[in-house]
Amino acid sequence: QGNALSASIPLPKSHIRRTPSELQLADDMRRAEYEDVRMYARLVVGMQSQCLVSGYVHPLTRKSLQDILKTKEADEEELEHDDSNHDLDEDWELAHVEERDENSVDT
């Protein structure tokens, strides 16, 4: 007969005691995910509202929305890869466009 080993019996996660730091980490991760979802919604809704008000989708707005969606769907490995290949020369240029009042008279 001899050295027969019995199979281990898996315990449900509820039986595993978590340390305070593990509990805090889990809570922090849930909170961060919640805040990410809120920020994603705010960005998308804000951009959508601007497009609806103006009746126009600026090409940079379209690119931003595509990048936001791509980031939302990406996993961590893809995001780390994208960060390491980021070229500062590809950043947007900021330009000032002076709004003109239709009722003003040029002098």
Image: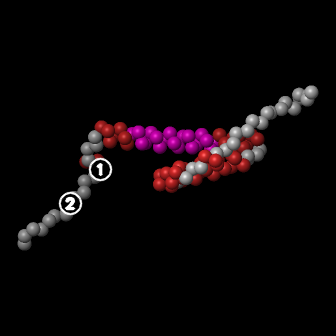
Q: In this view, does 12 lie to the left or right of 96?
A: left
69 versus 36 height, above or below: below
Query: What residue is rendered at 54% in x and 40% in y?
Result: 38
10 and 54: which is toward the camera: 54
Marker disc for residue 50: none
Q: Dot 2: what SS?
A: loop
Q: What stretch is highlighted in magenta?
A: 27-45
Q: Does the magenta stretch include residue 53?
A: no
Query: What residue is rendered at 92% in x and 27% in y?
Result: 107
**Residue 2 in picture, x, y percent from top left:** 7, 70
Dot 2 corresponds to which residue?
8
**Residue 73 in picture, x, y percent from top left:** 54, 53
To which quarter of the image does residue 97 belong?
Answer: top right
Quarter of the figure that contains the N terminus: bottom left
Determine the main secondary structure of the stretch shown in magenta.
Answer: helix
Q: Is residue 78 left or right of residue 44?
A: left
**Residue 106 in picture, x, y percent from top left:** 91, 29
Report crowding for label 2: few under 14, some 14 to 19, many 20 or more residues within 10 A (C-alpha): few
Q: In this view, does 1 lie to the left or right of 37?
A: left
60 and 90: which is toward the camera: 90
